């Protein structure tokens, strides 16, 4: 269906501005501040704020029967305006890579939203063979779990860098849940110093799972500009928020609210306080190269 959304409020770098969006032939054909004089179905969205669909990190998706899986995804993702999630499978031995990747993919066959899969490994098995495997299987994110500085110092980072080129998977630190904050801070600093010195693509901190990922992170991972942006030629995935009196800082406190309407790839996933679950509507995302727009 072709239509126009008029006068919605978009938040860009903390600034509010009115925008219109033209959707035609299942594609965004215009997104900007001009009014569109076209004979199409129009929605006056002056009471709404508009955002791109969100990207969430979901490290611990439970293995559930279908009905429970449906409820879990509806409550945790669809009602929050999440159109893409990042998750991972865990291995402690390289020989388990294929088996665990297949298991993760099977567990997400009914996913109603798009997903990106990474791998989480202990620092002790990070080696060139693992990097080569990730390149072969197009796994763009490697989550590294470590508890001591010595584990980082033993990694052959020069070989890791050589093996990473040209795919350059991104490295993200992760810590055991029970680790104390001050310990995490010290290890994060060590991690950042090492990977900056080696000029390897990385995040300096673990991903947070309770809030939409920021655009800087989306760019580093390589999802941008496919995801997390409304643009001409882009995906029809957006959220509309009814602007109540207290809803003045949508960009700052967005995770505190549920959207009034959420659309993913041109179809409703949440409307009238009801999630619309489409099993298998989500696709696995392939990243050809990370950090292109950093």
Image (spheres, helix red, strand yellow):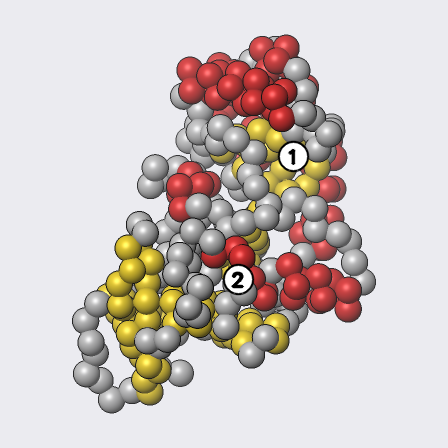
Q: Is residue 46 visible?
A: yes
Image coords of residue 242 (percent x, y):
44, 72
Left or right of 266 in this view: 151:
right
Secondary structure at numbered mark 2? loop
Q: Quadrant of residue 199?
A: top left
**Mark 1 burial class by Cα count in 10 Å: few <14, some 14-19, many 20+:** many
Secondary structure at numbered mark 1? strand
Front-lying residue, 208 or 1: 208
Residue 257 numbered tag: 2
The mark that comes first in sequence, 1 or 2, is 1
Residue under the point 53% across and 62% down? 257
**Mark 2 burial class by Cα count in 10 Å: few <14, some 14-19, many 20+:** few
Front-lying residue, 163 or 229: 229
Residue under the point 63% across and 37% down? 119
- Provide the residue designation for mark 1: 120
Q: Is residue 28 above or below residue 61?
A: below
Image coords of residue 1 (percent x, y):
40, 83
């Amino acid at each position: 269906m072709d239509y126009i959304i008029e006068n919605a409020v978009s938040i860009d770098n903390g600034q509010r501005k009115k925008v219109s969006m033209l959707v035609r032939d299942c594609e965004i054909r215009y997104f900007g501040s001009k009014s569109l004089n076209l004979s199409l179905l129009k929605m006056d969205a002056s009471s709404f704020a508009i955002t791109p669909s969100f990207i969430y990190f979901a490290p611990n998706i439970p293995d559930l029967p279908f009905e429970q899986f449906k409820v879990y995804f509806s409550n945790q993702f669809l009602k929050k305006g999440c159109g893409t999630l990042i998750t991972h499978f865990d291995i402690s031995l390289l020989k388990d890579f294929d088996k665990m990747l297949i298991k993760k993919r099977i567990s997400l066959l009914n996913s109603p939203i798009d997903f990106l899969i990474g791998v989480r490994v202990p620092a002790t098995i990070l080696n060139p063979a693992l990097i080569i495997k990730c390149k072969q299987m197009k796994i763009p994110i490697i989550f590294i779990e470590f508890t001591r500085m010595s584990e980082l110092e033993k990694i052959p980072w020069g070989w890791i860098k050589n093996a990473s080129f040209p795919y350059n998977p991104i490295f993200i630190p992760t810590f055991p849940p029970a680790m104390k904050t001050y310990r995490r801070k010290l290890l994060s600093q060590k991690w950042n110093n090492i990977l900056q010195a080696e000029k390897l693509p990385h995040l300096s901190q673990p991903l947070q799972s309770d809030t939409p990922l920021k655009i800087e992170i989306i760019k580093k991972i390589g999802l941008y500009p496919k995801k997390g942006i409304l643009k001409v030629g882009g995906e029809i995935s957006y959220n509309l928020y009814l602007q109540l009196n207290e809803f003045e800082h949508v960009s700052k406190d967005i995770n505190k609210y549920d959207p009034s309407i959420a659309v993913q790839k041109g179809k409703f996933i949440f409307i009238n306080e009801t999630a619309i679950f489409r099993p298998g509507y989500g696709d696995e995302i392939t990243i050809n190269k990370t950090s292109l727009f950093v």
